[in-house]
Amino acid sequence: MEQKPPFPPFTMETALQKVQMAENAWNTKDPEKVCMAYTIDTEWRNRTEFIQGREAVKEFLQRKWQKEHDYRLKKELWSFTDNKIGVRFEYEWHDESGHWYRSYGNEMWEFNEDGLMARRYASINDAAIDEKDRRVL
């Protein structure tokens, strides 16, 4: 049986730990590693894209990090309940032509009893920035 501690119900300490673990994993830019935090049948909404299943998440992340160069993410716990966590985040990246962006958003996460994320709903907006204005380093 796959498990990913800490497990719900979350406390302030374990919710903060879960958020930091997610930030650390995403900053590896390793789709194989990141997708293992999700259930086999995970449901995602990422911007306007609907994704179903761990394999589809892995494929999504491969595409994402082929486009978003020098990606760097920061997450912040916003709220939590028994098995749900809300986060705000921002990340910075540049495209192939060297144009930099800061992407802002909110995520709603729902976990199963084994600590795997069963649902992830993300709303994200992009803002063009100058490289000198980067702050997520």
Image: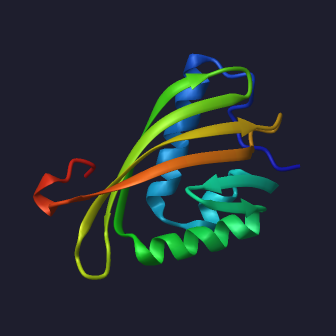
Please give the name of the residue rendered at 77% of the width and 53% of the height, measured from the top-left corner. Answer: 42
Outermost residue toward the right in this view: 1
Please give the name of the residue rendered at 46% of the width and 78% of the height, measured from the top-left corner. Answer: 66
Please give the name of the residue rendered at 32% of the width and 64% of the height, measured from the top-left corner. Answer: 93
Q: Is residue 23 left or right of residue 86?
A: left
Q: Is residue 10 visible?
A: yes
Q: Is residue 39 visible?
A: no
Please give the name of the residue rendered at 81% of the width and 38% of the height, measured from the top-left corner. Answer: 114
- Between residue 115 and residue 104, name the one nearer to us: 104
Q: Quadrant of residue 4?
A: top right
Give the vertical position of 72 relative to 19 (above or below): below
Q: Looking at the image, how many numbered discs can be counted on the residues?
A: 0
Describe the colour scheme in one phrase: rainbow
Give the vertical position of 10 relative to 18 (above or below): above
Q: Is residue 90 left or right of residue 83?
A: left
Outermost residue toward the left in this view: 132
Q: Is residue 33 left or right of residue 137?
A: right
Q: Quadrant of residue 58?
A: bottom right
Expressed as whole percent of the image width and height from the top left, the position of residue 37 reads 68, 51
Outermost residue toward the front in this view: 48
Expressed as whole percent of the image width and height from the top left, the position of residue 34 reads 60, 58
Expressed as whole percent of the image width and height from the top left, the position of residue 126 reads 36, 56
Q: Is residue 66 left or right of residue 5?
A: left
Expressed as whole percent of the image width and height from the top left, the position of residue 39 reads 79, 52
